[in-house]
Amino acid sequence: MPRSPTAIDQHVGARMRAARLEAGKSQTEVADAIGITFQQVQKYEKGTNRISAGTLHELSRLFDTPVQFFFNGMDGGASRRGNSKGPAALDLSPALAQRLTA
């Protein structure tokens, strides 16, 4: 049985969205660049689907950022199934934070 997405998956998805917006790319552009559908990008960003290590690597290359970027801002003590701080706790510029909540 596949594992369900966790708060960590949601955090990584929110960071993916932040990186995409910072890069000025659409979900379709990201999808085309890494060979997936834009619907899959949506699911990753919402934390509905888990992102594989290989996909994280591709995203880090696409956004020219280290893989660790996707995990920055996580509560170090969060359990796999526990709650993370969520997208509101991400370390973002004020302008980007406003775009994410718009």
Image (spheres, rainbow, N blue to C red):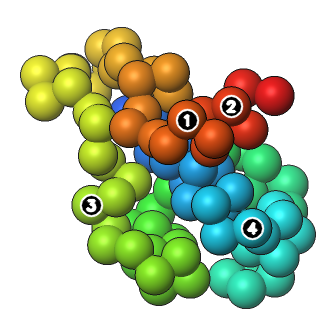
Quadrant where the C terminus sits is top right
| Residue 57 x, y percent position in the rendering | 41, 77
Q: Which residue is mark 4?
A: 24
What amino acid type is highlighted by mark number 3?
Answer: Gln
What amino acid type is highlighted by mark number 4?
Answer: Gly
Alpha-carbon distance for marks 1 and 2? 6 Å
Residue situated furthest front in the rendering: 94
Q: Residue at x 56, y 82 (%)?
A: 62
Q: Earlier in the sequence, mark 3 or mark 4?
A: 4
Q: Image check: 48 left or right of 7?
A: right
Residue situated furthest top in the rendering: 83
Q: Earlier in the sequence, mark 1 or mark 3?
A: 3
Alpha-carbon distance for marks 4 and 1? 16 Å
Secondary structure, mark 3, is helix
Q: Earlier in the sequence, mark 4 or mark 1?
A: 4
Q: Earlier in the sequence, mark 4 or mark 2?
A: 4
Using the rendered image of the protein, determine whether residue 48 is visible from the camera's viewpoint.
no
Secondary structure, mark 4, is loop
| Residue 67 x, y percent position in the rendering | 33, 68
Q: Residue at x 73, y 86 (%)?
A: 33
Position of 66 relative to 81 (above/below):
below
Secondary structure, mark 1, is helix
Q: Which residue is mark 3?
A: 68
Q: Earlier in the sequence, mark 2 or mark 3?
A: 3
Q: Residue at x 27, y 33 (%)?
A: 74
Label 4 or label 1, whichever lies nearer to me, is 1
Q: Which residue is mark 2?
A: 98
Q: Pointer 1: residues within 10 angstroms few (<14), some, or many (20+)?
A: few
Do the numbered discs 1 and 2 sit on residues whose CB atoms are within 8 Å? Answer: yes
